[in-house]
Image (cartoon, rainbow, N blue to C red):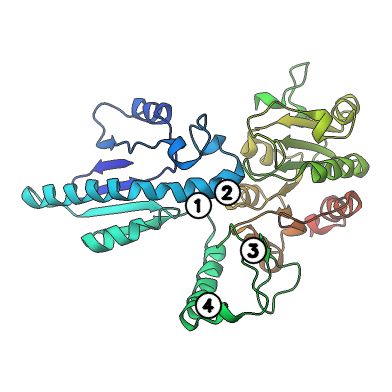
Amino acid sequence: MILSFLTKVTLVILFACAASPKDVKRLRSSLPPTSSIHLLEILFNNLDHNLPPDIENTDSIPYHHIPILLKATLSFKPHFKKLISDFVYDQQQHEPKPLFIITSMFFEWCAEIVKELVVFHALFTTGGGFGFACYYSLWLIWIILIENRIWLNLPHRNTDFDEFLLPDFPEASKIHVTQMTELLKVADGKNWLDLQPRNSVLYLSFESQNTISASQMMELALALEASGKNFIWVVRPPIGFDINSEFKANEWLPEGFEERMKNSRQGLVIHKWAPQVDILSHNSVSAFLSHCGWNSVLESLSQGVPIIGWLKASEQFYNAKLLEEEIGVCVEVARGKSCVVKHQEIVAKIELVMNETGKGNE
């Protein structure tokens, strides 16, 4: 949590689901001695919430543990309420200043507290406006359903399934329950991208926690090799594997794939992380195969790079709809956790976007 004591207003920011003592120490050391920003810690014990003990922050948590972590943040509620209540009382006894609280969208319970204390409050989200406008519209419908108790009598309730269809939506529009530079150097020291022709490289990267399955990773590798296109692929552990595990090429990729790509210089496989903005800004990059998270969308559009969408969850579906149907800079190749796409289909979408007569050159 951050407290910022400005001249005329006090700003409180609740910003992290699980920040380790190391994270807080690093943040604190980055502040100048005269800073008006103060960091306060709310203690959190992983074991009390059936979370692995070695998880220090959200970067190291497996995707299937994220809902557990979000539920566990409810334990912050009494501590947060006491802190804000004491702060408001102290302000009233001395020189009153407006108090403004900014919280992550994942701390929706904060709204109850600030409403009770009559404090200014705003939610912060890193998603796009269109996606959250869609969420808002769906939420209004959901409120009506709850009020009328229609859902109790639905003949085909889908609450036991991970994915479900909305009324009048096509089969492809499934909603998931989770919705409600140094690495680019080659041996001779030259930048790999500098060796590639202009607009010839496909960049591929999925989000850290929710990447694709091992079987789909195999299909994607086959597609890349069959396409003949140059590529940079940031490979993270597939779903079902520890996100902090060692790179296992023999389990995640076709036999000899990484070595063949290296020898032929067709592609560069990077393990876990790459400087995405630097890559997208390079003139050799022609397209971006992405999960369509909003940060990735902004980084790609800011560099004029079209997107091949492999959508997983959250507002990514709405982001892709906006990009494809309204802006015309995206082609969708897959959507949803259970989606299975063959390498021939992937090759077709790559060629559609990257060929000179394709979508990416319109």
Mark 1–mark 2 distance (CA, rounded to whole Å)? 7 Å
> Relative to residue 111, is residue 85 drawn left or right?
left
Q: Position of residue 66 (x, y in %)?
A: 54, 46
Q: 10 Å neighbourhood of mark 2: few (<14), some, or many (≥20)?
A: few
The kind of residue on which mark 3 rests is Asp
Q: Which residue is mark 1?
A: 126
Residue at the image point whose x is 65% and y is 61% from the top: 317
Instruction: Tell which tag, 4 or 2, sits nearer the viewer.
Output: 4
The kind of secondary structure element at disc 1 is: loop
Point out the tag, 1 or 2, that comes first from the N-terminus: 1
Q: Nearer the viewer, residue 192 or 88?
A: 88
**Label 2, on which residue?**
295
Considering the numbered disc 4 on the image, is that residue within a helix, a strand or a loop? helix
The residue nearer to you, when weighing 302 against 334, is 334
| Identity, as a three-letter code, of the amino acid under mark 2 | Asn
Q: Position of residue 332 (x, y in %)?
A: 76, 59
Decide if residue 316 is on the left or right side of residue 48: right
Q: Are marks 1 and 2 in contact (CB under 8 Å)?
A: yes
Q: Which residue is mark 4?
A: 141
> Which residue is denoted by mark 3 in the rendering?
160
- Marks 4 and 2 close (CB-CB < 8 Å): no
Q: Are marks 2 and 3 in contact (CB under 8 Å)?
A: no
